[in-house]
């Protein structure tokens, strides 16, 4: 959308600098004075964005009432952990872990695994709450993501990289030493398919038609996440 707006209004004289900062789960926008502009790195993108009257409507629709104060607060350590948590195996193996000032990779990897398991627990509790509120479609989605993050945490721990975070790849790369790994693979695969149906299919209409699947997945997700946590604890990944 933004690229399209740039192409259409590139010739307009009136322009301002916009900084769009992407942090987990949020978008925030802020006007940045030209004398403060610099090309950043990481998760921040800056571009010169013309703002005619038509663009004001885009701003109101896409970024309603978002200010810098509404951004989640991320510490420097949060940003380091976030970066490491998405690195591939080859990138992590290239980090300096020896010498005078070695990168504390082992500590950070354990923290990432722990934090992603904690996120999985949050999704599980959110799904349980949605079941109690009879919001079965949304419950299916949250319970799937509890399983997804649990699986992603332990695969990251074993592989020492986030190479298999894709939803269609992750089930096939669960640790072979995990108890009942083939059953866990089937559960995660089927949960994803159910989540796709709950999120994208119009039918069955209403919530009642999803109740049985949602309640069954709630139980499966709790057992699955428990297995992921046990694996991480038993093998010293957290």
Image (cartoon, rainbow, N blue to C red):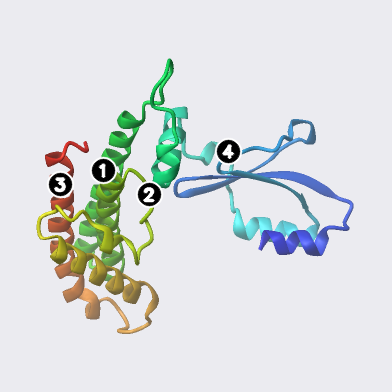
Q: Foreground mark, 1 or 4?
A: 1
Q: CA distance from mark 2 to mark 3?
A: 18 Å
Residue at mark 4: 68
Q: Foreground mark, 1 or 2?
A: 2
Answer whether labels 1 and 2 touch (C-beta < 8 Å). Answer: no
Q: CA distance from mark 1 to mark 4?
A: 27 Å
Residue at mark 2: 162
* Precedes in sequence: disc 1 or disc 4: 4
Residue at x 49%, y 48% (from the top left corner) = 26
Apparent side of residue 57 relative to residue 194 in the rendered image (left or right): right
Q: Residues within 10 Å of mark 4 (few under 14, many from 20)?
A: few
Q: CA distance from mark 4 to mark 2?
A: 30 Å
Answer whether labels 4 and 3 touch (C-beta < 8 Å). Answer: no
Instruction: Inspect this view and state whether residue 9 appears.
Output: yes
* Precedes in sequence: disc 4 or disc 3: 4
Q: Foreground mark, 4 or 3?
A: 3
Q: CA distance from mark 1 to mark 3?
A: 14 Å
Residue at mark 1: 118
Q: Residues within 10 Å of mark 2 (few under 14, many from 20)?
A: many
Image spot of residue 2 (x, y percent): 68, 59
């Amino acid at each position: 959308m933004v690229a399209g707006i740039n192409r259409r209004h590139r010739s307009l004289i009136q322009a301002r600098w916009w900084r769009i900062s992407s942090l987990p789960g949020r978008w925030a926008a802020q006007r940045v004075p030209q004398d403060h502009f610099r090309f950043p790195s990481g998760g921040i993108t800056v571009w010169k964005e013309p703002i005619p009257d038509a663009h004001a409507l885009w701003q109101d629709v896409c970024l309603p009432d978002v200010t810098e104060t509404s951004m989640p607060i991320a510490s420097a350590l949060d940003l380091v952990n976030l970066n490491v948590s998405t690195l591939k195996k080859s990138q992590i193996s290239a980090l300096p872990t020896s010498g005078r000032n070695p990168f504390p990779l082992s500590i950070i990897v354990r923290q990432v695994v722990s934090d992603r398991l904690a996120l999985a627990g949050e999704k599980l509790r959110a799904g349980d709450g949605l079941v109690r509120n009879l919001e079965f479609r949304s419950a299916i989605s949250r319970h799937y993501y509890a399983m997804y993050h649990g699986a992603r945490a332990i695969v990251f721990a074993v592989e020492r990289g986030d190479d298999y975070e894709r939803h269609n790849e992750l089930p096939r790369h669960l640790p072979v030493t995990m108890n009942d790994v083939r059953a866990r693979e089937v559960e995660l695969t089927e949960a994803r398919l159910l989540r796709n149906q709950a999120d994208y299919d119009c039918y069955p209409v209403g919530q009642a038609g999803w109740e049985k699947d949602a309640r069954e997945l709630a139980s499966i997700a709790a057992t699955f996440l428990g297995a992921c946590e046990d694996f991480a604890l038993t093998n010293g990944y957290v």
